Image: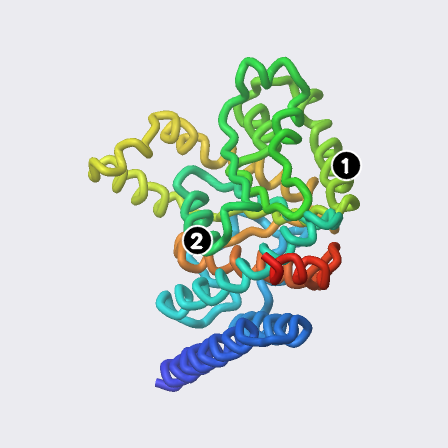
Amino acid sequence: MGNKESKKKKVSKIAKTMDKVAQRASKADGSESVVAGLSQAAKSSDMLSSVFSLPPAQRLRFRPGQRLADIDAGETPGFDGNKAECERFIGLSATEISRYQRLMYANGLHGSKRRVLIILQGMDASGKGGIVRHVFHQVDPMGIHYHGFGAPSEEDRQHDYLWRIRKELPPAGWISIFDRSQYEDIVMPHVYGTFPPEVWQKRYGEINDFESELVADGCAILKIYLVSSKEAQKQHFLKRLYDPRKYWKFDPSDLDARDRWDDYVAAWQDVFEKTSTPDAPWYLIPADHRWYSRMAVSELLRTTMKNFNMTWPPLDVDRAEALERLEAD
């Protein structure tokens, strides 16, 4: 009884916190002062983050010695609320993400190099597509770029493996979302032996250098691995096979990869150990409860952009002259 009452109190506290967030966000939108509006938005974002007992940037970051195989994909680390509260959180967070995305885009047009690269990885049916649909549903399409990486094309094979990655990187002020990424060029040959070890093993260091250069040039990198259980994947595959509206999602190769589950886990374990760096850490997010994984990604993205501490760029024309011309028209 005590635990149930305690959880009710926590849930109630989360609901009250989000009520306050909504009120503060409204004040930010209605503020006539640019500085005051941004200050209110920052406070609103901080308050929204407080629904976590420990920020996802800390709780979900890969730690040395952590084992992918030991993560419970059904957990919701740092969040004691329910699905409905989580979905409300995503809605409130999406509003703030939209605000910070417009701010970043505007500054990109005025010389800022700030931009964001989001890398989404995970086993088939781990929810990568749902992340994009839910987290970015309020974002202005101008300034967002999504790209899914499949098997390299014939043209891709004629170049270095990072060639196709570089083509899709975000310009200044933009967010690029990668569904799979350069890490496939390590994991796939690791699992299937399509290249000798001396070819793909050197890519760990090459990718670290590549990402370090991006970060030094103003690009924030969020590397997300959605941790799903084998049972949850099975249920999603069954839904695809029983629902005619989802037939298009199913590919027999998904079952081939499922047969190599343990090999994939081992390959990704090596990736995390060798490429989770201070510049670009990996975040391992339990994804059997998709509402939680979407919430965690939303939190990571929003706080990343908030921490850019941007303000609206100044007007770079003669305001008085422009007003005079308009009034004379």
Residue 283 versus residue 234 in the image, above or below: below
Q: Residue at x 58, y 24 (%)?
A: 189
Whether residues under marks 1 and 2 lie with C-beta atoms below 8 angstroms apart, the answer is no
Residue 145 position, x and y percent, is 54, 40
Residue 219 versus residue 257 in the image, above or below: below
User: Is residue 90 toward the left or the right of residue 212 in the image?
Assistant: left
The answer for how far apart the CA atoms under marks 1 and 2 are is 33 Å
The colouring scheme, among rainbow, by chain, secondary structure or one colour, is rainbow
Q: Residue at x 33, y 34 (%)?
A: 249
Query: Mark 2: which amino acid?
Result: His
> Earlier along the polypeptide chain: callout 1 or callout 2?
2
What is the secondary structure assignment of the residue under circle 1?
A: helix
Mark 1 or 2, closer to the camera:
2
Query: Mark 1: which amino acid?
Result: Asp
**Which corner quadrant holds the C terminus?**
bottom right
The part of the image, by quadrant, that contains residue 47 is bottom right
What is the secondary structure assignment of the residue under circle 2?
A: loop
Residue 103 position, x and y percent, is 63, 58
